[in-house]
């Protein structure tokens, strides 16, 4: 595109040389002669001169100069696109008669796409603040009344860049805009909720979760996860329990939800429900080690309590039955995590209780 912008500009009638403002016209003469450095330096000198500071033609020429510098491979400098953009905007502000309006809008249209290109380059190199700035400029152009055209993908890129740059409030505003535009489905609610939670906007976070769940009931697993974890972190087990119970109705095949539901029921002393839910977790995911461990621990603790109260042989046998169930669960844990010292200690104790000396010796040999 080298000097392409200059060529289409020079065919416009708005560039008939005027006798006045000779120095201003020299900027364009330099550019026509491919003396870009001279054109840049002169334009920068003139814009701080009170005589020319409010000259729309000068600012337009400066925009063209910097746009050409950006497009010039030999002088490639991605930052110059911002100078070109600012100069185009200044032109529009000063050009009361709109002499340069058409060409300015053409230039901004080109720059809008170039901002996207630069934004992607910055994003891929993990320079998220600069990526965010580039995408924002594209959107600013798109929001101009004479253009009024926004690309939802660019808005999404802006939101992600803002989030990764740590501009969480700005990220939230773009996610909200995308939700209003019905872009991205439930994912936008997920993204917005996470950002709102990070900045501590709890009420808005909760409203976002609720709205997302209502809008996408069959796709709201992550939203349930967010709100359940939120209440768990606040030690609000009642609300955590309520949302877990509701979520299971929609996502009955989630081993994680059944495990959490089991844990919450166990905490509430509802061991029968907890046992059923731990078993359901294992049924759904045979590799769910924590479910074996928790169920084993529950059996073990019940056995301990029964043994303390045992007055008859039948009562002791009942305690022993829970110990055996616990042993079976901890053996599963050991199979999956053979280096877990806590599991090894528990199995050593259980093997000793049942006089399984060989197995106890093996466990004791593995203790650190």
Image (cartoon, rainbow, N blue to C red):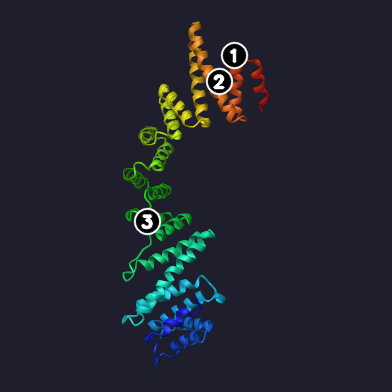
Q: Position of residue 319 (x, y in %)?
A: 50, 13
Pick whichever of labels 3 and 2 is earlier in the sequence.
3
Q: Left of 356 or right of it: where is 209? A: left
Badge 2 density bin: few <14, some 14–19, many ≥20, Cα 10 Å? many
Residue 219: quadrant of the picture: top left
Quick check: marks 1 and 2 in contact, CB under 8 Å?
yes
As drawn, the residue found furthest toward the bottom would be 19
Q: Is residue 357 above or below residue 142?
A: above
Residue 264: quadrant of the picture: top left
Q: Left of 115 or right of it: where is 92? A: left
Residue denoted by label 1: 354
Mark number, residue 327: 2
Q: Secondary structure at mark 1?
A: loop
Q: Position of residue 329 (x, y in %)?
A: 53, 23
Residue 280: quadrant of the picture: top left
Label 3, label 2: how many angstroms apart (C-alpha)?
A: 54 Å
Label 3, label 1: how many angstroms apart (C-alpha)?
A: 63 Å
Visible residue check, residue 31 = yes
Q: Is residue 157 above or below residue 95?
A: above
Badge 3 density bin: few <14, some 14–19, many ≥20, Cα 10 Å? few
Pick whichever of labels 1 and 2 is earlier in the sequence.
2
Label 1, label 2: how many angstroms apart (C-alpha)?
A: 10 Å
Badge 1 density bin: few <14, some 14–19, many ≥20, Cα 10 Å? few
Name which residue lies at 56% across and 27% down. Answer: 333
As drawn, the residue found furthest toward the top would be 312
Pick whichever of labels 3 and 1 is earlier in the sequence.
3
Mark number, residue 95: none
On-image quarter of the C terminus: top right
- Name the mark nearer the viewer: 3 or 1: 1
Mark number, residue 173: 3
Q: Is residue 328 above or below residue 245?
A: above
């Amino acid at each position: 595109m080298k000097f392409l912008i200059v060529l289409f500009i020079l065919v416009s009638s708005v560039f008939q040389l005027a006798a006045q403002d000779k120095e201003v016209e020299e900027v364009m003469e330099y550019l026509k002669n491919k003396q870009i450095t001279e054109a840049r330096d002169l334009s920068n000198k003139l814009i701080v001169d009170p005589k020319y500071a409010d000259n729309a033609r000068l600012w337009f020429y400066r925009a063209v100069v910097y746009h050409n510098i950006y497009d010039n491979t030999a002088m490639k400098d991605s930052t110059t696109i911002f100078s070109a953009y600012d100069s185009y905007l200044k032109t529009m502000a000063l050009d009361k008669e709109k002499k340069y309006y058409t060409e300015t809008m053409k230039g901004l249209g080109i720059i809008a796409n170039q901002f996207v290109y630069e934004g992607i380059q910055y994003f891929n190199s993990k320079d998220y603040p600069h990526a965010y700035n580039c995408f924002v400029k594209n959107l600013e152009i798109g929001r101009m009344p004479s253009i009024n055209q926004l690309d939802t993908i660019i808005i999404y890129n802006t939101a992600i860049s803002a989030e990764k740059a740590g501009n969480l409030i700005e990220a939230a505003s773009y996610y909200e805009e995308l939700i209003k535009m019905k872009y991205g489905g439930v994912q936008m609610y997920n993204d917005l909720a996470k950002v709102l939670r990070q900045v501590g906007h709890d009420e808005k976070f909760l409203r976002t979760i609720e709205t997302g769940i209502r809008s996408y009931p069959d796709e709201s697993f992550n939203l349930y996860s967010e709100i359940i974890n939120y209440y768990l972190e606040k030690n609000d087990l009642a609300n955590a329990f309520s949302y877990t119970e509701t979520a299971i109705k929609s996502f009955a095949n989630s081993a994680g939800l059944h495990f959490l539901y089991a844990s919450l029921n166990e905490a509430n002393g509802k061991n029968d429900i907890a046992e059923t839910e731990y078993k359901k977790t294992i049924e759904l995911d045979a590799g769910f080690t924590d479910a074996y461990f928790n169920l084993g621990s529950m059996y073990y603790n019940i056995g301990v309590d029964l043994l303390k109260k045992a007055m008859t042989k039948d009562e002791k046998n009942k305690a022993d039955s829970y110990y055996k169930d616990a042993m079976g669960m901890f053996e599963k844990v050991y199979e999956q995590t053979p280096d877990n010292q806590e599991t090894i200690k528990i199995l050593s104790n259980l093997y000793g209780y049942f006089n399984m000396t060989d197995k106890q010796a093996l466990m004791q040999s593995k203790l650190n």
